[in-house]
Image: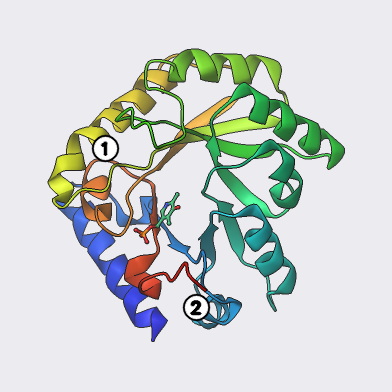
Amino acid sequence: MLIDNYNMVRSNIDAAAKRAGRNPEEITLIAVSKTKPLEDIEELREAGVREFGENKPQELKTKYDNISAPVNFHQIGHLQTNKVKYVIDRAVLIHSLDSIKLAEEIEKEAVKHDKIADVLVEVNYADEESKFGITKDQALPFIREVAANFPHIRIKGLMTIAPFVDNPEDNRYIFKGMKQLLLDIISENIDNTDMSVLSMGMTNDYEVAVEEGATMVRVGTAIFGERNYSI
Ligand SMILES: *Cc1c(COP(=O)(O)O)cnc(C)c1O
């Protein structure tokens, strides 16, 4: 059953937290249900799971609109400006703010829906060409600009997608660097921000991410099994 996989991941997180002298309760496990059917989400929901991650805005919308009782959906994947309307009122947190253009659109939709949108800034820490995100050097000026110009956006922290590596230890410097970046930005005391979230770690490397300070991990494959993109 899916809940057994979920519980296994959860106990690995708790063990990693303890190794690092952290309180396991600081860490939220987001079950990444992208491409998986609503029944899988319902199964976990009935077992008490409440946090789910989707990377396609329309898929998030469809699942949100059809689930039989509310859960929290996170928009974890790249968000195009013309798709903000699907998630503005449905996602508890947008993990992937990566441009001023997107911030403008989120601001506009947030005003329309009379809400404050909680977001994370996506950082492309390893400067991979294939990935979205702000460079680590641009993170601070970017956050200053968003905080100063978009009163309906609240920046809650940072997110990164680390490279796919065989050995998760190879990503440790990234998670360490992200934690330091978060601390550096917190120390700037920027108005209109509430930086505390560090969203990092996936099936292959979440334990290392937790050891280095992740407060949200996004795990799909280890809970739901391999994804099939061909159907
Ligand atoms: C798919 C995805 C995940 C989960 O990946 P797994 O390797 O299956 O755990 C996490 N974060 C983002 C942004 C994703 O798109």
**Distance in Å between CA atoms under marks 1 and 2:** 28 Å
Q: Is residue 154 visible?
A: yes
**Which of the two labelled residues, at mark 1 and mark 2, occupies the earlier sequence position?**
2
Kindly identify the amino acid type of the residue bearing the numbered disc 1.
Answer: Phe
Q: Is residue 84 visible?
A: no
Instruction: Tell whether 189 sits left or right of 135.
Output: right
The x, y position of residue 163, in whole percent, is 28, 42
- Residue at 42% x, 31% y: name it: 123
Instruction: Tell whether 110 sits left or right of 17.
Output: right
Secondary structure under the numbered disc 1 in the rendered image: helix
Above or below 89: residue 221: below
Q: Is mark 1 within 8 Å of ligand 1?
A: no
Residue behind mark 2: 44
The x, y position of residue 218, in whole percent, is 40, 55
User: Which part of the image, by quadrant, shows the N terminus?
Assistant: bottom left
Of all residues, the one furthest to the front in this rendering is 230
Of all residues, the one furthest to the bottom in this rendering is 1
The x, y position of residue 219, in whole percent, is 38, 60
- Residue at 46% x, 62% y: name it: 32
20 or 225, nearer to the observer = 225
In which image quadrant can residue 11 be found?
A: bottom left
The quarter of the image that holds ligand 1 is: bottom left
In which image quadrant can residue 41 be found?
A: bottom right
Q: Residues within 10 Å of mark 1 (few under 14, many from 20)?
A: many
Kindly identify the amino acid type of the residue bearing the numbered disc 2.
Answer: Leu
How many callouts does the rendering have? 2
In which image quadrant can residue 66 be found?
A: bottom right
- Residue at 32% x, 49% y: name it: 201
Residue behind mark 1: 175
